[in-house]
Amino acid sequence: MKENDTLLKMVGVTKTFPGVVAVDDVDFDVRYGEVHALVGENGAGKSTLIKILGGVYDLEKGSIFFDGDEVSFTSTHQSLMSGISVIYQEFNLIPDLSVAENIFIGREPKRIAGRFVHWKKLNADAKGVLDRLEIQIDPRTFVSDLPVAERQMVEIAKALSFESKLIIMDEPTATLTDREVKKLFEIISGLRREGVSIIYISHRLEEAFELADRITVLRDGKKIGTRICTETSEGEIIEMMVGKVVKDYFAGEVRKQRERELIMEVKNYSIADHIEEVSFELYRGEILGFAGVIGSGVHHLLRSLYGVEPKKGGQMIFEGKPVEIRSARDAIKLGFGYVTEDRKNAGILPDMTVLHNVTIIIIKLLTFLRGMFIKNSTEREKFNEINRNLNIKFADYGQKIIYLSGGNQQKVVIGRTLVTNCKVLILQEPTRGIDVGAKAEIHRIMRELANRGISIIMTSSELPELVNLPDRCIVLYKGRIAAEFDRESMEEEKLVAAQIGQAGN
Amino acid sequence: MIKFLKLYEKIGIFIFLVAGSIFLSIASPHFLQSDTILNIIAQGTYGAIVGFGMTLAITLGGFDLSVDAVMALTSVFLSILIPLIGIPLAIFISLIVACFVGLINGLIITKLRVNPLITTLAMMTIIRGVALIVAGGRQIVIHEKVFMEVGTGKLLGVPNPIYIMVVLFVIFYFILYHTPFGRHISAVGSNESAARISGLKVDLIKIFVFVLVSFTAGVAGTIRTSQTLIGIPTMSPGFVLVAITVTILGGTSLSGGRGNLWGTLFAGIFISMIYYGLNLIGVQIFYQMLSVGIVLILALFIDGIRGRYLETLKAKGIKV
């Protein structure tokens, strides 16, 4: 069965779960030294497919050939030993161990009758692997002390230390900044030169195009097709993914023209170590974007405006009056809403229902008997009123939020701020980790809100979102304003340049 | 199967209770008499009452290990105050003292930011110590026989503690499920960061919950003291385990955010039923403590299996 250039060949792979066919008769192959992108919306079957490869799920039907032999993995260990490493979105590193220990966990070099860890050799071996990837991390550092990007590098190093022939990366760039993504891409190119094959799963099409030799699209568990990157277009791939023609990612957006009416002025705003003397204005009904790589202070600024991070100095003038926002309560009272970039850990209330998640901020107002008891009918009315615009898809009022898709969860979190009738909405990474269709819907919702007169301050690590969505975009570099663009002057190249400190036009 | 597991989460303890009743009615001809049943329920009131408070604390994502010490402190204060200021005022002030302990718990946890488990563990020995100091290290006999009515009296044939339990249940039920405050408790227990960002007064909510837990402990301490007419500074050692067992067995999620007060109520009665059953087959009283521990571990074990099973289903992409 060995074909000269094919490392992995999956034929007719099928996997069903009660009630769903997760992967339906899929053929898939990867060549030696190839980067093969795997794309598809949430629920398309990508995860199931790689979990079959990783030995998490048993193969139900079909066959897999790897490096010339037919294989069938019944455990993750087996798959790893055969030369397949899977780097999942949630890392499998142990935070309280060092980088070296993590790389060689379970197979540490031993000394003295094989009883004690040979620390010197362990660290030297780890250094060797890291050097091969040209990663500057001390192998004795604790993983908990590393930023996300470097943890990912460690995962890759670990995969490499197994001499893996195939490395599968599931959404590797979801939490990385542009610069870190660049570094990752360099590493991937290096691996390819060494003959290692990569399966690259991503929501970001432009990355797939930059990196991959071929792209395979899955939809509803079926393979829609495989294309050679240089012979296709983003438009074609998106069409394959969603099954219908999507002309323009940001199409259908109608901007309402209005008089510029100042709602907020921020003067000489500073945050210790992060923001230096930043001043800007915010107008009613506009979407103001903030761009900046990690270290620019963008996230700190947005958090601080909402009062969840202390400021060092500066003034805020809101609707003509100077205001002090010291806490989220202050901000909410003034008419601010805030959606965090960390939906899972600081956004959703996972144990509570969709309904209760939306109404939590204003629940005190949905009551009777002098605010003593919650009035269920009022609560539902309020929810339905908000949901007319949001269109959250849920089964019933008692459904818990964790059972919704990422996109619907995000709508719930946005809805929570909307019930307060906020005037300023701060959105950090509004579309992180949600699929293409839901992204477009969030964009639509944001524009509708702006048209209704709500001012939106947003930031995103996805460039197209910052380039296309906001009316104005301010670029921060090392805590200071580096550039500002409006719709006319906005150019992707200039924005990127400003982000990395090359603002001089 | 999934439906059964979801149902189990809601009313699992009720199934245990019914199964236990069937078993006992076969094993003992006396079981199905109304006196026996009322007696079992009355014996279960302490566990259930403190369990109500504990349910709020665990829903909040916290724990209160100081409840049995608070019961003892209440007992000592009652025995000292009753001869001085009369029964009603003595009960009132003793309950205030109990609430005050909760206030201190809450302040230490929120303002000094000490872990709730450690705080209340330390407070457990501190409060025991205070109770012993106040009582001068001995038990204090109460001579006002009328006080006994609180814990042993009956109204329409039903023991008073059952009325107290029902009233508290209704109050706590409304607090947890029908007031903004209850919603806030769930929110804090579900995701504290999100609750803060949503502008909830997280610290105040926590403090108030710890006050409520101590209040329930005070009520349980009052009932027990009235039944023996002795102020006991060493009252109910280890009772905190019963309160936690009742809460977990009742289906309140250990990770916070989801409280099940009906479950707590039934679990309180179930524990009492186990005691009765053990008595029936002639097991010594020392073994009762042991049985509670075993039940707690079993409850957590079953809950763990259930949780992991649902997780696997979710991982396989099945809607649960």
Image (cartoon, coloured by chain):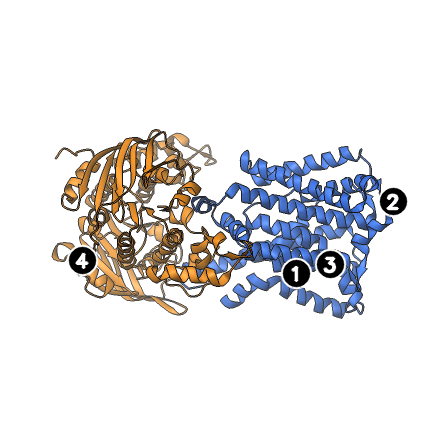
Chain colours: A orange, B blue
Residue A476 percent location from the top left of the image: 25, 36
Residue hosting label 2: B143
* 1 and 2 marks on the same chain: yes
Q: SS of the residue at dot 1?
A: helix
**Relative to residue A430, is residue A14 depicted above or below?**
below
**Of marks 1 and 2, which one's residue comes earlier in the chain?**
2
Q: How many numbered badges does the structure rendering display? A: 4
**Of marks 1 and 3, which one's residue comes earlier in the chain?**
3
Q: Tell which subunit mark 3 falls on.
A: B
Mark in front: 2 vs 4:
2
**Relative to residue B122, is residue A159 depicted above or below?**
below
Can you say which quadrant of the picture contains the N terminus of chain A? Answer: bottom left
| Kind of residue sitting beneath label 1 | Phe
Residue B97 in sight from this viewpoint: yes
Residue B248 percent location from the top left of the image: 60, 54
Q: Tell which subunit mark 4 falls on.
A: A
| Kind of residue sitting beneath label 2 | His
Rendered residue at 62%/60% (across/down)? B262
Label 3: how many Cα within 10 Å (few below 14, some 14–19, many 20+): many
Residue hosting label 1: B266
* 4 and 3 marks on the same chain: no
**Relative to residue A195, is residue A392 depicted above or below?**
below
Residue A68 in sight from this viewpoint: no
**Label 4, label 3: how far apart the Cα atoms are:** 68 Å
Label 2: how many Cα within 10 Å (few below 14, some 14–19, many 20+): few
Mark in front: 4 vs 1:
4
Give residue A415's quadrant in the image: bottom left
Residue hosting label 3: B162
